């Protein structure tokens, strides 16, 4: 089968699969205040359909899969899907992004099913602030989930922190200090304009360079060389001298990484998205449910990849945002 290479010669080897748009949190920046109506059960891809796409895309060069949501762990039998995906030989890297609320319960089973890497979203270390940004979340449960993941041997455990001016900027150093003793990778992510009703304003985004500058007022940061000029995926990695963990910066706004974008996203309702900031989507469900052959599916994948934009949206000063809220994309 032909590899997935777009019109700009970018090889697509990373598929992010959202398995549900339901979430057990209501993060203010991810979901509008009034909530979003969830897809009906029939709209959401079945695990067999997801698996079929994973196998086909793996034959076309996908070697990394990330499971996301909504909150992936609220979907029934997520462990079973992980077990199937982990057995696809070409998939070298299987990971999940989760808010951690249900991890205490699921970490051992997920690990046994073949998931060994986790990104856990935690935007505040302060229980009240966490409750406020997530509209009701319990930070103690996230910590219990992180501990359970450690006990189950997950490594590395990456903690995603969306840096938002006026919300958690006072905690940047507290997050960074966690890496002194713990092997976490704390990743500061620039706040992005996603979702038509998001309240995002340019001044809400703290540029990665500014976060780094503030951290360096505490201690110097040494680049971590992961063999790609300090980048690991889109993250630029550093650490404090002799620290156990690492600090990453992900800068989709101030220093976009479109030129090296290797990603494809599959939404829970079966739409392929080639760019987070674009509204272009390819609906695979009619094909999947219409008894299509693998050849027809492959043709659709190739067409979709060939139209992957070079760059989009919030980049280059144009503050366009895609209409789907993040909870219905998966990050
Ligand atoms: N429920 C899971 C979780 O909380 O990690 C997975 C889905 S969530 C949509 C995936 C990631 O997207 C989270 O780390 C979240 O913080 C991030 N995210 C959501 N909206 C964002 C935005 N506007 N800018 C940057 N990151 C965002």
Image (cartoon, rainbow, N blue to C red):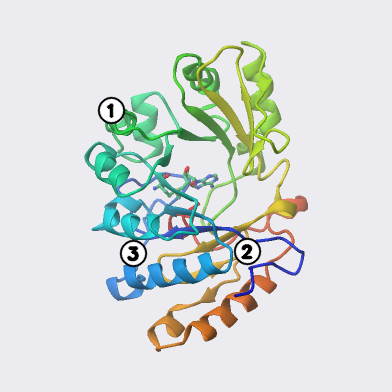
Q: Earlier in the sequence, mark 2 or mark 1?
A: 1
Check disc 2 and report its element: helix, strand or loop.
loop
Query: Would you name the residue on which mark 3 appears?
Result: 38
Q: What x and y, as percent, mark residue 221?
A: 66, 18
Query: Would you name the residue on which mark 1 appears?
Result: 140
Query: Would you name the residue on which mark 2 appears?
Result: 278
Check disc 3 and report its element: helix, strand or loop.
loop
Q: What x and y, as percent, mark residue 192?
A: 59, 46
Judge left or right: residue 152 versus residue 201. Answer: left
In this picture, is 290 found above or below 49?
Answer: below
Q: Earlier in the sequence, mark 2 or mark 3?
A: 3
Taking the image as drawn, is residue 129 in sight? Answer: yes
Mark 3 neighbour density, 10 Å: few (under 14) some (14–19) many (20 or more): some
Q: Nearer the viewer, mark 1 or mark 3?
A: 1
In this picture, is 212 found above or below 181?
Answer: below
**Quadrant of the rendering where the N terminus is positioned:** bottom right
Q: Earlier in the sequence, mark 1 or mark 3?
A: 3
Taking the image as drawn, is residue 102 in sight? Answer: no
Q: Quadrant of residue 87?
A: bottom left
Q: What x and y, as percent, mark residue 309?
A: 71, 65
Of 113 and 167, nearer the camera is 113
Mark 1 neighbour density, 10 Å: few (under 14) some (14–19) many (20 or more): few
Check disc 1 and report its element: helix, strand or loop.
helix
Mark 2 neighbour density, 10 Å: few (under 14) some (14–19) many (20 or more): many
């Amino acid at each position: 089968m032909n590899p997935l290479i777009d019109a700009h010669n970018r090889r697509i080897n990373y598929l992010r699969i959202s398995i549900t748009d339901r979430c057990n949190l209501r993060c203010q920046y991810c979901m509008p205040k009034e909530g979003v109506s969830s897809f009906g059960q029939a709209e959401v891809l079945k695990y067999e359909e997801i698996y079929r796409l994973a196998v086909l895309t793996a034959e076309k060069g996908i070697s990394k899969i990330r499971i996301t949501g909504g909150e992936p762990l609220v979907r029934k039998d997520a462990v079973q899907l992980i077990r199937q995906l982990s057995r696809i030989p070409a998939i070298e890297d299987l990971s999940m992004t989760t808010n951690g609320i249900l991890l205490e319960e699921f970490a051992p089973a997920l690990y046994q099913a073949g998931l060994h890497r986790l990104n856990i979203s935690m935007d505040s270390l302060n229980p009240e602030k966490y409750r406020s940004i997530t509209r009701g979340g319990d930070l103690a449960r996230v910590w219990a989930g992180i501990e359970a993941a450690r006990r189950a041997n997950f490594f590395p455990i990456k903690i995603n922190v969306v840096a938002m001016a006026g919300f958690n900027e006072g905690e940047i150093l507290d997050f960074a200090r966690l890496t002194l003793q713990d092997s976490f990778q704390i990743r500061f992510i620039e706040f992005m304009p996603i979702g038509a009703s998001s309240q995002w304003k340019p001044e809400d985004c703290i540029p990665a360079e500014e976060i780094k500058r503030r951290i360096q007022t505490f201690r110097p940061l040494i680049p971590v060389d992961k063999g790609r000029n300090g980048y690991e995926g889109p993250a630029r990695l550093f650490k404090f001298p002799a620290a156990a963990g690492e600090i990453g910066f992900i800068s989709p706004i101030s220093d976009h990484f479109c030129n090296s974008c290797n990603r494809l996203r599959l939404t829970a309702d079966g739409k392929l998205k080639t760019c987070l900031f674009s509204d272009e989507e390819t609906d695979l469900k009619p094909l999947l449910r219409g008894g299509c052959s693998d050849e027809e599916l492959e043709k659709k994948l190739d067409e979709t990849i060939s139209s992957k934009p070079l760059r989009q949206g919030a980049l280059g000063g144009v503050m366009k945002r895609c209409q789907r809220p993040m909870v219905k994309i998966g990050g």
